[in-house]
């Protein structure tokens, strides 16, 4: 962690390490529609999500990402920061000077949430859903725990043409049903949400 702090001295590190079984990059950003966010805040807030597939091997890419986008927050999956584990981990890097507090989550999934205290509160949740333990009800339980307004990012191991996959799978259809049931919006800029 010290090399990360040195590399990104203007960023705080918030890490939760847990075991991950598969690697499929998928970007989702949900925002709660029941509450209106300050539009100016959303226009100026930069949040980057990246499945880094091992942070220590990709520090140069992280540095370039920070220089290019100057984000308020970076959500990382598959940090691989615990030496005893071959894979796993989710983390937030939050720009220094942005007040935040952790939001406790009760979930078996690899998830971490923080509430940024900027001009108004904004909750960010970073999640990794392992391919072999997918349960859409567990994702719904996470959504229910998040103070609104919120943004949920991560790797859900779900596929749908709605977010740029070549085909749909059952998990993708279940996730779309959850989005509808929870009155959420899927934000996607038409870029690929996976790495080939």
Image (spheres, rainbow, N blue to C red):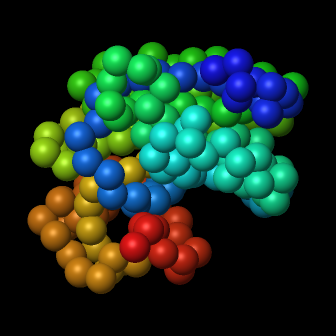
What residue is shown at x 45% (from left), y 46% (from top)?
A: 53
From this view, report whether residue 138 is shown above or below residue 169: above
> Can you say which quadrant of the picture contains the N terminus?
top right
What residue is shown at x 68% (from left), y 52% (from top)?
A: 61
Of residues 7 and 134, the one nearer the viewer is 7
On the image, the x and y values in percent for residue 65 come to 73, 54
Relative to 174, 62 lies left or right: right
> Can you say which quadrant of the picture contains the C terminus?
bottom left
Q: Is residue 135 visible?
A: no
Of residues 137 and 169, the one nearer the viewer is 169
What residue is shown at x 26% (from left), y 60% (from top)?
A: 158
On the image, the x and y values in percent for residue 133 come to 14, 40
On the image, the x and y values in percent for residue 46 come to 74, 52
From this view, report whether residue 141 is shown above or below residue 157: above
Of residues 52 and 74, the one nearer the viewer is 52
Figure disc tally: 0
Relative to 122, 45 lies left or right: right
Relative to 29, 87 lies left or right: left
What residue is shown at x 54% (from left), y 77% (from top)?
A: 191
Q: Is residue 104 visible?
A: yes
* Picture quadrant of residue 75: top right
* Picture quadrant of residue 64: bottom right
On the image, the x and y values in percent for residue 48 come to 64, 52
């Amino acid at each position: 962690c010290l090399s990360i702090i040195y590399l990104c001295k203007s960023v705080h590190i918030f890490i939760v390490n847990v075991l991950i079984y598969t690697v499929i990059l998928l970007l989702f950003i949900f925002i709660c529609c029941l509450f209106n966010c300050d539009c100016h805040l959303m226009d100026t807030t930069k949040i980057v999500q990246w499945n880094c597939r091992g942070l220590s091997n990709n520090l140069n890419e992280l540095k370039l990402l920070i220089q290019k986008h100057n984000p308020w927050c970076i959500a990382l999956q598959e940090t691989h920061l615990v030496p005893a584990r071959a894979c796993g981990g989710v983390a937030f890097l939050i720009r220094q000077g942005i007040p935040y507090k952790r939001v406790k989550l009760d979930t078996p999934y690899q998830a971490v949430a923080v509430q940024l205290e900027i001009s108004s509160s904004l909750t960010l949740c970073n999640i990794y859903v392992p391919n072999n333990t997918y349960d859409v009800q567990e994702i719904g339980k996470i959504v229910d725990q998040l103070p609104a307004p919120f943004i949920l990012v991560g790797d859900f191991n779900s596929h749908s043409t709605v977010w740029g996959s070549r085909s749909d799978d059952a998990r993708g259809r279940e996730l779309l049903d959850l989005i509808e049931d929870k009155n959420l919006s899927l934000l996607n800029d038409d870029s690929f949400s996976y790495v080939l």
